[in-house]
Image: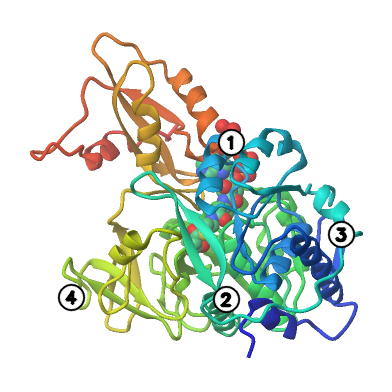
Amino acid sequence: MNDNLYELLRRHFPADPKAPWLVTPEGDTRYYSEIDDVTAHYAGVLRSLGLQAGERLLAQVDKSPEVLLLYLATLRLGAIFVPLNTAYTPTELAYFLNDATPRIFVVEPRNASVLKKSASAVGATLLTLGNNGEGTLIDAVAEADPYTSVADLGADDIASIIYTSGTTGRSKGAMLSHGNLSSNALTLIDLWGFTENDVLLHALPIYHVHGLYVAVHCAMLRGIPMRFLPRFDSDEVIRQLSSVTVMMGVPTFYTRLMDAPKFTRDLCQHMRLFISGSAPLLAQTFEAFFAHTGRRILERYGMSEASMIASNPLEGERIAGTVGFALPGVTLRVCDAEHRTVVTGETGVLQMRGPNVFKGYWQMPEKTASEFTDDGFFISGDMATMDAQGRVRIVGREKDLVISGGLNVYPKEIEDAMDVFDGVNETAVIGVPHADLGEGLVAVICPLPGAVVNPDAVIAQLKTQLAGFKVPRRIFTVDSLPRNAMGKVQKNVLRERYAQAFDS
Ligand code: MLC
């Protein structure tokens, strides 16, 4: 049997040639019946450029139907798709290029001249793909011989690498196999009760597991249409809502919708399901949404290393502040530092095992080994409790991590960048409550004696190096950072001190 995920998806394409796959707000409709032919042509182009099974295709491109076709073509060839956040700067991209050593790098036409040199430095062929379907990739399609087969793969072959920031400041590439992705998607379509009558609202970015895998695979395995928005925009979501039955989003989507005057209870009555993930859904958001719409958001829990892990039930009680139960086939346990399961209800580190759990970090065998227990459980780094029924509550993080608008940010990366700025002695970056983003980034800077640090200049300098979502929105200067007896910076003290930083 061929375990290529493309083959699984293709088996579920509807027989009706007019079954829509994607519909954009401009009314551009793509059909399931077109996918096989178009991806054969895309795959033909990629193959003619030398892309082989197991090699990487790196893509930093705006969301468009063509990007999904490129993803599917890469799967089809058996190559590895590596999507990157469009906010990454050339400095950040240089790291990903060196680490992933792709055969092909696909970029927006507007970025091609800047990135050409760094692509050729690692031997990658640069292709362009614009969000209006223009670029050298598309130009080449007309010439290419289509690749009409589907590479024969095993379940453990790698389909994709998703980069996650790391506690050491260095991004790690989580390797997800065809088996990881298919098992997860097959579980979710049943768990969340997808039927042929559903229509999915897709407003998420497609460079992370949430928008690319969870949303797209669920829709495609049921052969249902997606209303495909280039980005989240409350007005556009409200316009589309009457045409859809399921929405997936991060908590920010739900708070922004409630802030929009046109978002009414009536608009939501036909909706089958609102799903939230990627960041904690505050109990107050869950309650407010219920009061506003009469609908209880279904909160689920996941991460790049394991896609979806736990979910509140479709039928049965959805409890605010919990992420529900382990997905079928996934084993969860809450453990102490020695990896022993703690007493029911006590706090420990959440560990997991199952067909969804990734194959390790790209070219980091030691790091991979240190994140798995001897009996094969992945150590998530999230602190959790589990009740006697198996219901999980995430109560904190073992890692120094901030989640802003559904995007993970590791403070160490930003601290490392600022520590070498002129006049800076040391820095600490923290996340504090932010009404829109859940957590907002705050930097606390301790200047060198006699030096003056200008917050605006720090922000401007950071923006040249780091993606915008990693740049702190507030900067405070202090004479010294609070430390404990061991000399470690007490971030909890700083989080308390600056808890109101975004109140006004
Ligand atoms: C954008 N900005 C952010 C930000 N997104 N700042 C902090 N946190 C974020 N998440 C900044 C930009 O740099 C810019 O700054 C300004 O905000 C406006 O940019 P924008 O692009 O117009 O922002 P907006 O469209 O409002 O985007 C916000 C958002 C978006 C929340 C809608 O970030 C989003 O779609 N997030 C979803 C992320 C996601 O899919 N996560 C899944 C990860 S998978 P400036 O200074 O230039 O103005 C995962 C596993 C799992 O976690 O379980 O799902």
- Measure the C-alpha gap from mark 2 to mark 3: 26 Å
| Quadrant housing the N terminus | bottom right
Q: Residue at x 60, y 40 (%)?
A: 121
Measured along the vertical axis of the image, is residue 276 above or below residue 253?
below
**What's the residue at 54%, 38% (across, down)?**
467
Residue that mark 2 sits on: 178
Q: Nearer the viewer, mark 2 or mark 4?
A: 2
Q: Earlier in the sequence, mark 1 or mark 3?
A: 1
Q: Badge 4: few (under 14), some or many (20 or more) residues near its Cα, within 10 Å?
A: few
Q: Earlier in the sequence, mark 2 or mark 4?
A: 2
Q: Residues within 10 Å of mark 2 (few under 14, many from 20)?
A: many
Give coordinates of residue 266: x percent, y percent.
Answer: 70, 64
Label 2 beta carbon within 8 A of ligand 1: no
> Gap between marks 4 and 1, in whole Å?
44 Å
Q: Is residue 137 left or right of residue 490?
A: right
Amino acid type, residue under disc 3 in the picture? Val
Q: Find residue 90 and name its label.
A: 1
Kindly check if marks 4 and 1 are in contact, taking CB atoms under 8 A apart as contact: no
Q: Which residue is mark 3?
A: 141
Residue bearing mark 4: 340
Q: How is the image coloured?
A: rainbow
What's the residue at 34%, 27% (across, down)? 419
Farthest left residue in view: 485
| Residue 92 seen in the figure | yes
Res 277 seen here: no
